[in-house]
Amino acid sequence: MAEKLVVVGQGPAGLPLATRAAEAGFRVVGLDDDEWRVKRLNAGEPCVEGVGAAELAAAHASGRYIASADPADASGFDFCVITVAVRTRDGAPDLGPLGTAAGRVAPFVRPGATVVVETAAYPGTTEEFAGPILERGSGLRAGEDFHLGHSPSRAEPGNPRWRIGNTPKVVSGVGPASLRAVTYLYGRLVRETVPVSSPRVAELCALLEAARAHLDAALANELAIFAGQLGVDVWEAAEAAATSPYGRSGARPGPGLPGSCLPVDVAYVPWAVRGRAVRGFRLVEAANDVNAHMPAYVVDRIGLALNRRCRAVRGSRVLLLGLTPVEVAKSLCRLGARVRAADPRADSRAGDLLVPAGVEVVEPDAAELARADVVVVLGAPDCYDYDLVQRASRFVFDTRGRCRGPNVERL
């Protein structure tokens, strides 16, 4: 019989992993505490970026994938991967979701089973936080009776080139036997595994990758502010810089912190060293500050653009293409704008992307675009017809560099 894999969390990291594992021959249970999401997945609706309807249909057709909200369905697993997202609260990581996930599967850990944490957190989380919860719930010892490891998630929803199967996977384990078990699991799912000496190294690797992307975004965002003041098109400069063969030159500005966990992951770095190190992580803290202030800057630019068109923000009809960062929608509502939003992830029940009060979710058809005083290209998903956006809209404020034309102002 095929080996059983439980993937805890069926969001942007968990669902692609689950469907890939079903394709590779595992019997997969996608465990998620959101019953509405579970119903949608079992009805063939992916509901997250990174997995299309065809991929989910293939997983169901194989008979090797099912979504469930019942922890009892984890019984008898050979492998378990925890992918739940961790947020911050009052400047510190809130490990509650990870603790809940570990507690749900702990009673079903048996001798020889393997548990992998993919949730990004500060170095030491797997061994010092998740491990003890699993041990208490199972009565077994991590690294001795069952295998425990960490493998950073490298999922990038919407990237057509790099998918789970061809993206190298960093793997680690609590001891040599755990490392072998974790390497075996991912060796069935990806083309290349990269073993490291401990879960702490793997966790720091995840933070390093997130920090690098975060710093790139902060630099591009700060340049966008200066470019706007100088009357220079920052997007043209960024496109030219991307042709350099030396190092990373592909950073693009944006409206603020991405909708993913990346900025939260980066915040773990200064939090983890606070009180332990001689100096703080000043570079990351500065990047956090720049990126956190971008939504306010975007709202200011929208206000100035409307003012040039003899319109006030109050009473203006604003259509947002994308709802993240959500602070933009909230600020516009507070200023009295009539805010509509088009985002395939937007649903008050979904949990991952709540719709703020005062925002109406609509379809971005030609009529809706034409009625808006300003259409704001805000979110990252490439699910909009940008040619239609440019043609049908009276005015477009583009924070993502997707549109061009006489009626378009770019960040």
Image: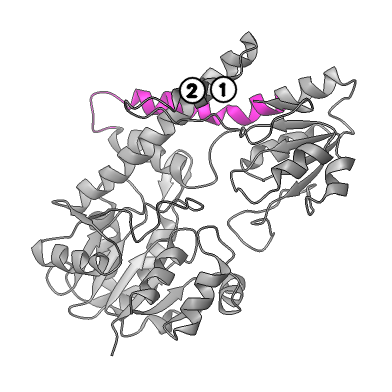
Q: Position of residue 5 (x, y in %)?
A: 33, 76
Q: Nearer the viewer, residue 85 or 366?
A: 366
**Mark 1–mark 2 CB contact (< 8 Å):** yes
Residue at 82 percent across and 24 percent down: it is 306
Q: Secondary structure at mark 1?
A: helix
Q: Is most of the magenta stretch helix, strand or loop?
A: helix
Q: Is residue 384 above or below residue 240?
A: below
Q: Nearer the viewer, residue 265 or 298?
A: 298
Callout 2: SS: helix
Question: Is residue 284 a member of the stretch shown in magenta?
Answer: yes
User: Nearest the camera: 149 or 99?
Assistant: 149
The numbered dot on residue 236 is 1
Q: Assign the N terminus to one quadrant of the image.
A: bottom left
Q: In the rendered view, does 309 fall on the left or right side of 121? A: right
Q: Residue at left 78%, top 47%? A: 359
Quadrant (top left/top right/bottom left/bottom right) for the C terminus: top right
Q: Residues within 10 Å of mark 1 (few under 14, many from 20)?
A: few
Which residue shows up at 14% across the image and 75% down it? 145
- Tell me the amino acid under the disc marked 1: Glu
Gap in angstroms between the C-alphas marked 1 and 2: 6 Å
Residue 68 can be seen in this image: no
Residue 53: percent from left, percent from top: 57, 70
From the viewer's perspective, is 232 left or right of 58?
Answer: right
Whether the magenta-drawn stretch holds residue 273 is answered as no
Reply above or below: 40 against 195. Answer: below
Which mark is on residue 178?
none
Q: Residue at x 30, y 61 (%)?
A: 130
Inspect the image, locate mark 2, and give the three-letter code of the amino acid beneath it: Ala
Q: Which residues lie in the magenta part?
A: 275-300
Q: Residue furthest left?
A: 176
The disc label shown at residue 240, or none = 2
Q: Position of residue 260 (x, y in %)?
A: 50, 47
